[in-house]
Amino acid sequence: MRRMLVMVLVALGACSEDQPAAANGAAAGFSAIPAKHYGLGRAVTPAEVAALDLDVGPDGNGLPAGSGSATAGADLFQKKCSMCHGPKGQGMLPAFPLLISRDPKAEGFAFANDFKLQKSIGNYWPHATTVFDYVRRAMPLLQPGSLTNDEVYALTAFLLAANEVIPMSATLDSASLMQVKMPYRDKFVDDNRRGGNEVK
Amino acid sequence: MHLAGGEGQGDTLSRRDLLAGAAGASGVAVAAGLPLVAGGPGPKAAAPVAPVVPPDATKLPGAPTSQVGARSTFFKPSRTPFGETVGNSLTPLQDLTGTITPADLHFERHHAGIPLIDPARHTLLIHGLVATPLMLSVDDVKRFPQVTRTHFIECSGNGRAAYREPKPEMTPQKVAGLVSNTEWTGVPLKVLLDEAGAKPAATWFLAEGGDACIMTRSIPMPKAMDDALLVWAQNGEPLRPEQGFPLRLLLPGWEGNVSVKWLRRLELGTRPWATRWETSKYTDPLPDGTARQYSFDMDAKSVITSPAHPKVLAKGWWPVTGLAWTGRGNITRVEVSTDDGSSWHDAELSPTTGRKAPVRFTHMWEWDGKPAVLLSRATDETGYVQPTRKQLLKVRGIGTDFHFNPIVGWKVAADGTVTFHGET
């Protein structure tokens, strides 16, 4: 009985949902559109998903097998990264970001007071996993996606070590990378702006 | 010859400065190895051909019809390309009227160049916490119920330079040109997520682009079920390549970066992914020593687009006109001051409907030849009033990185010259 009622409601909804075009000025979004199945698209195999699903979460979910040492990463950095980010990871601003710095002047998360303070992986980034995820998906700029997982682990280890987050003797794999806590992780807070008469 | 700075609008640097700096810093001449991102001249338009204008256009036949129209040779608006592979270009707000941005003048911001994508091969994967993972072709997407909506996109870096270091010679394009407005056509994202069977446990989704940085942003599910769109058309024709051809996400009222272009994958999950673009960038340091993250909403903002630098005024009547917008719904009021904020006048708004779409405001003003300061101030439906720069400096600091919506304006000198006034 209940199932029939649902079907009737869906059918009724179908009369209007092909044109869910409420006025642009209406406050409501599209949440009132009843769910309907159009049978479009095709099913996907797990292999197809795996080929595209390369994201790594802050909990380490998605980190692949493999490992790399900071010292191996130091060599790789000179070969594959330093032409843009500088041999010491100092960047070439503004096009190529600074990556490595623990300049005491930029410690303490006072960036709002001085826009000339340079943010680095060590003094700003909240999650170590982001380094792995971003390097794997986007770097090097002219050959994105060309690094092996071991190379990405090595570069991640080097960048974290050069930023004094882990020792230069460290080797990273999925288990150890997800354990790394970044120095300023707790400084990131959720958006508290809600409109209304308060400026935040 | 400029490079893009940071995310969105920023400082610029000449190639000569860059190479000199690089060589100086490293002691290595790296010119030959530098990728194209290192600037060089941006794309240049062909040299304009001076039109041969007849003394009387009614005395000879005019030009024939054409396959694709072109602008009048008397009107040559242009964006301002900075950088190449990593770059941006700003909309020439001072040259435009109404509220719609012509597609070829929509601002650009891309992080690894504009990919060349064959729509016949492009697919969108929807997976994660769904009943049925789906692979959709572009043609599949176009068979779902379509909607057309007008919404602005604003880069959350818009106005950074004018906020941090206001300069008299800034134009509307430099002050606020990382906002554009478009009539988009696409399918409500909710319809696609219903098709895949989004599970109630899903609280966030990841949107991923098909460019060379495989751009990723995490979005709360309520937005997906509210007014989010997957769009393929821009002002009546397919998206421009620089706007995400063949598919882009469109999240009305939110910072532009989340409207991921060249969209290829949506993954539903239970927490944000903390991608580079929502941690290292697009977070907002605050004076209390924290940084705001997932700061999606664009606050109410307005800017006078005319008169503005470098216009020179004559005495008499002028429409003081510009654009106002808010990520939180409708603009309910725009006030204009012609005396540096001592008194305010309600401006005419047109059109008056259009959620998360700009309105054009106009206030007629008779200039008497004395120095004046023109300002505009927007209010939105939540009661939020566009703040002064001083108010923003207090709550966000000079070094905050994104979301700049101070009241700004233009100084009119006794000789009629107009310069930017950002120190409100």
Image: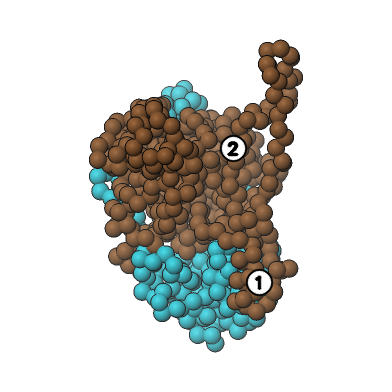
Viewer-proximal residue among A60 and A27? A27
* Callout 2: SS: loop
> Chain letter for brown?
B
Viewer-proximal residue among B398 and A178? B398
Determine contact: label 1, label 2, CB under 8 Å. no
What whole-number distance in Å separates the C-alpha atoms at marks 1 and 2? 36 Å
Q: Which mark is residue A83?
A: 1
* Callout 1: SS: helix
Q: Quadrant of the N terminus of chain B?
A: bottom right
Residue at (60%, 49%) from the top-left corner? B81
> Chain letter for cyan?
A
> Does A148 appear above or below A29?
below
Residue at (47%, 48%) from the top-left corner? B170
Q: Which mark is residue B77?
A: 2
Tell me which chain the residue with mark 2 is part of: B
Q: Position of residue B360 (x, y in %)?
A: 42, 31
The amino acid type of the residue labelled 1 equals Met
Tell me which chain the residue with mark 1 is part of: A
Viewer-proximal residue among B366 and A9? B366
> Does B28 appear above or below B145?
below
Q: Is residue A76 left or right of residue A164?
A: right
- Residues packed near mark 2 inside 10 Å, few (<14), some (14 to 19) or many (20 plus): some
Residue at (34%, 40%) from the top-left corner? B371
Q: Which mark is residue B369?
A: none
Residue at (69%, 72%) from the top-left corner? B30
Q: Position of residue B232 (x, y in %)?
A: 59, 37
